[in-house]
Image: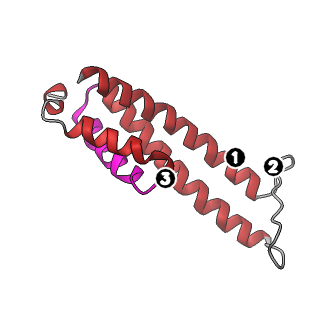
Amino acid sequence: MRTHIQILAWIYLILGGACLFAAVSVMLALQGAPGFEIHFQGFQGDFGPGARLATATLSAGLCSAIGVLAGFAGWGLLKRRQWGRILAIVVSVLYLPLGYALLLGIYGLIVLLWPGAAREFS
């Protein structure tokens, strides 16, 4: 069980950093920073700066929130803190509706809700 918790902790730390990197990239791309321009083809009309800013803020905000939560959960799991286990369970539930992280959410719930897992954090 200890190995599974450590693997899950490192995955959450790495995924949290990747989400924060993606949030910064999305913010730069949708705001039209030089070198990060996205051209929307197939749509009628032009997306104005207000729509780009709203989309960038919402996307980057959600991605960075999940990234920060995953990073803290990974850190708490590595340090074997009870709050880290609870936060990791919450993050695992948040990952369930996301297509790319569905299996990670299921794996996290199995590892953290296993009967012997609670003893690792006490």
In the depicted structure, whether residue 22 falls above or below residue 58: above
The disc, 3 or 2, on the residue closer to the chain's N-terminal end is 2
Mark 1 closeness class: few <14, some 14–19, many ≥20 residues within 10 Å:
some
Label 2 SS: loop
Indicate yes or no whether the magenta region holds residue 87: yes
Mark 2 closeness class: few <14, some 14–19, many ≥20 residues within 10 Å:
some
Q: Residue at x 55, y 43 (%)?
A: 19
The disc, 1 or 2, on the residue closer to the chain's N-terminal end is 1
Highlighted magenta segment, given as a residue range: 79-98
**Residue that badge 1 annotates:** 25
**Residue that badge 2 annotates:** 36
Instruction: Residue 110: name its quadrant.
Output: top left
Q: Residue at x 15, y 33 (%)?
A: 118
Mark number, residue 80? none
Q: Name which residue type carries label 3.
A: Gly
**Residue that badge 3 annotates:** 99
Q: Name which residue type carries label 2.
A: Phe
Q: Residue at x 41, y 50 (%)?
A: 95
Q: Name which residue type carries label 1.
A: Ser
